[in-house]
Structure formats: structure tokens, C-alpha cells
Image: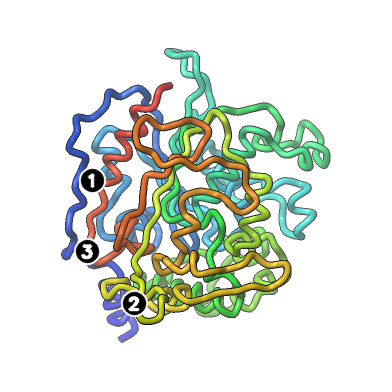
Amino acid sequence: MQRRLGLFLVLLFAVSSMLLAVPQASAADPPRQNQYPIVLVHGFGGWGRDEVLGFKYWGGFLDIQEYLTNRGYPTYTASVGPFSSNWDRAAELYAQIRGGTVDYGAAHAAKHGHARFGRTHPGLYPQWGATDPASGLPNKVHLIAHSQGGQTTRVLAQLLSEGSAEEVAATPAAELSHLFNTTRKPWVDSVTTIASPHDGTTLATGVNLFLPYAQQMVALIAASASTQLYDFKLDQWGLSRRPGESFNSYADRVWASSIWTSTKDISVWDLSPEGAKELNGWVKAQPDVYYFSWSTEKTYESWLTGYQYPEITINPIWSGNAWFMGSYTRNRSGLVPITASWWKNDGVVNTISMNGPKLGSTDQIVNNTGAPQIGVWNHLGVRESYDHSDIIGIGLYYDVRSWYGTHATRLGALPR
């Protein structure tokens, strides 16, 4: 019975047989100018390509990675901590792409009270950063990120560019991760964020709101996998799954942990407007990186109340979130004010938060109408009537692969 329920839920969550194709650009493709691979970076609660019985975060029953690779854009899918902080996720992403053991940093680990080292990875693209003998330039990557992944990729680009003075001061030179040294590493050609909470989401305004949403999402994923393969990837906090431990016991230990309320080194903080503002204060758009952003929404304004309500076709698991976010306001001392401008949303993130960092940020955001500008946020527009999972191909209506293909063409046309 549980397995049947799980299969029903995942079918409700992502019925690919009802997909409608998103049109490709009609103009001729611009000439290819770089061969940099694409790395897909999932958001809050996400998982890797070969986890959850192969049900894809990027595409659901379809496969965005395979589609892009077959079009001539080599693509890899990262799998970082679904609930970890953006600093920890960036350290994991660095090790995953390049290969090696995750180093969260001696200073960072000591400050937050977790282990310094994490898992060891073979490397999705081990030649990342090495000099291409044909061009004399470093091998770069294009990072495409959804939701919290947008914050994560920004942190990675920041650390690669400027390093961390705190880690340099706390670590002997021979032991310092290459990620944290202050040598500028121009290894990221572009960052693309999709439905990302650059200024946070009002869904994360309190643990009492945020954790039930997280628990519901994980329960859905675990049920759909039936064999309960979901991995919280919180080893640094001592929350790895024990041999022979049931998934329910494992999940209960995670949800009962004090990390959700006792530290800022966790997603709950980073995804709040206050946490996002703090992150925006030190994570800046780098002058040698192209930044792109896409926004999404799936709510409508009521003529009677002025509130935003979920569209009838929104994924049911996001509907309650959309109702809450569509009318929530806050004006409390010391907190980011939340006004009606925050109400439009995609069921998880407020649309106003998606075009780029604004709270506490000096980054420039422009509407992209022609050639992309480097070092600023090129906002590519709002995907209307797309909820938070529609845009990654987990939904009832859209096949987004050709849309990703069009963007891959845009990235391939960027000058070396």
C-alpha cells in the first residue's frame, strides 16, 4: 500500500506524459565560441542524478543533462547537501567538480562546530581550472542553478575569485584548500540562476513554517523511491545514516537535531530574507563572470482582496505555500520588511527575490535585451504560470528541455 501511495504521489508530482513543449528561439543559433561544460546545481531539498531510483531533479522522468549533452553541450549534475548552508554546499560543489575531499575550511568548521572534512569525490570535470594547451586559457564551466543553488553558485564564484582571509589566517599554507587561497581563479564563465531566492523567501521566515515544508517534501521523495534512498548529506554534523538504520529513524534524527535552530550555518538561515541579506553583503558579482537570472510565478492577484492566490494548475504540494506567501506581511524592528511587493510567487520563492541580489547588495541588475553584459545580472524575464518545480521539468504541463537547450546555445556563444 505504501509503495502504491508513493508511486501515486510521484506521478502526481511529475506526470511527463502530459507535457507541452516550450518553443525554442526561432532565430538562427549564434556561432559557438566556447566549449565549456555545464554543471547543473540543485536547490533546497534536491538530489543527484542517480539518486531516488533515477527520478531526475533536472527533468523528472525526462533528463535535461542527457538532452543538453546530446545537443553538443557536455553537462554534469552535481549533488550537494540538500539542507546545508551555502558555504558548505559551495565547498562540496568545488570538490565534486574538481575531485578530492570536501574541505569546509578550518576556520569555518571551528566557528560552527562541525567537522572540517567531508566526502571524497572522483571529480565530474577533473581538468577544471587546468590550462587548455590549445588556447592557453583555463578550463572553465557554466553553472546553471535552481532555487538555493543560485546562492550556492554565487558563493563558489566569490571564493574562487577572492578566497577567504579567515581561512588563510587559520590554516597553515600547506593545509589550505585551493578554494580558499587568495589567488584569483577565473574558472567560472557564467552563473545562471533559475527561481533563486537571492533576497530570501518568506517561506523561511520561521522554522515552524519551514520545517514542515521540508519534511513534506522529503517524505514525498522517499515514498516515491520506495526503497528510501534519500540522503540528507549532513555528515559534517554527524548526521549520516547508520548501518541498518531505517529511513524513518534516520529522518527523525535529522529533524530532531538542534542544527535547525542553534546555528546560522544551515539552509534555514541562508534562505530567510535576513540570511540572504547577510550573504549578499559579502558575495558580489565578479567582473569576469556572466550572470543570468530567470524568474517564475504561478499566482494571480485577487480583485477583491489584492492578495496573490495560487493558479489552479500549480503543483498541489506548493499550493499551501503560495496561499501563505501571497498575503504575508511583516514590519518588525530589525527584520527585513515584507510588503505586498513580495506576494507574487511560484509556490516556494517570491518572484521579487529572483532577478538578482538587492538586499544589502551593490550588484547591478539589467533587463537583458541584447548582448549579455559581463559582471552584472542579466535578467532574462519572468516565466509566467511556472511553479517552482515546473521550471526544472518536474510538473504536469511543460517539457522544458528545449528551453534549456536554447539557453545552452546562449552560453556557448559567450566569448572565451
* Position of the N terminus by quadrant: bottom left
The residue type indicated by label 1 comes to: Ser
Residue 397's disc is 3
Comparing marks 1 and 2, which lies closer to the viewer? 2
Counting from the top left corner in percent of width and height, residue 317 is at 37, 75
Residue 402's disc is 1
Counting from the top left corner in percent of width and height, residue 131 is at 51, 19
Q: Residue furthest bottom?
A: 1
Q: CA distance from mark 1 to mark 2?
A: 35 Å
First reached walking from the N terminus: tag 1 or tag 2: 2
* Position of the C terminus by quadrant: top left
First reached walking from the N terminus: tag 3 or tag 2: 2
Q: Please tell me whether mark 2 sits on a helix, a strand or a loop.
A: loop
Count the numbered circles shown: 3
Q: Residue at x 51, y 57 (%)?
A: 197
Residue 303's disc is 2
Q: Residue at x 34, y 32 (%)?
A: 370
Q: Quick check: can you spot residue 247?
A: no
Q: Please tell me whether mark 3 sits on a helix, a strand or a loop.
A: loop
The residue type indicated by label 3 comes to: Tyr
Q: Nearer the viewer, residue 175 or 290?
A: 290
The residue type indicated by label 2 comes to: Trp
User: Mark 2: few, some, or many residues within 10 Å (few <14, many ≥20)?
Assistant: few
Counting from the top left corner in percent of width and height, residue 39 is at 43, 41
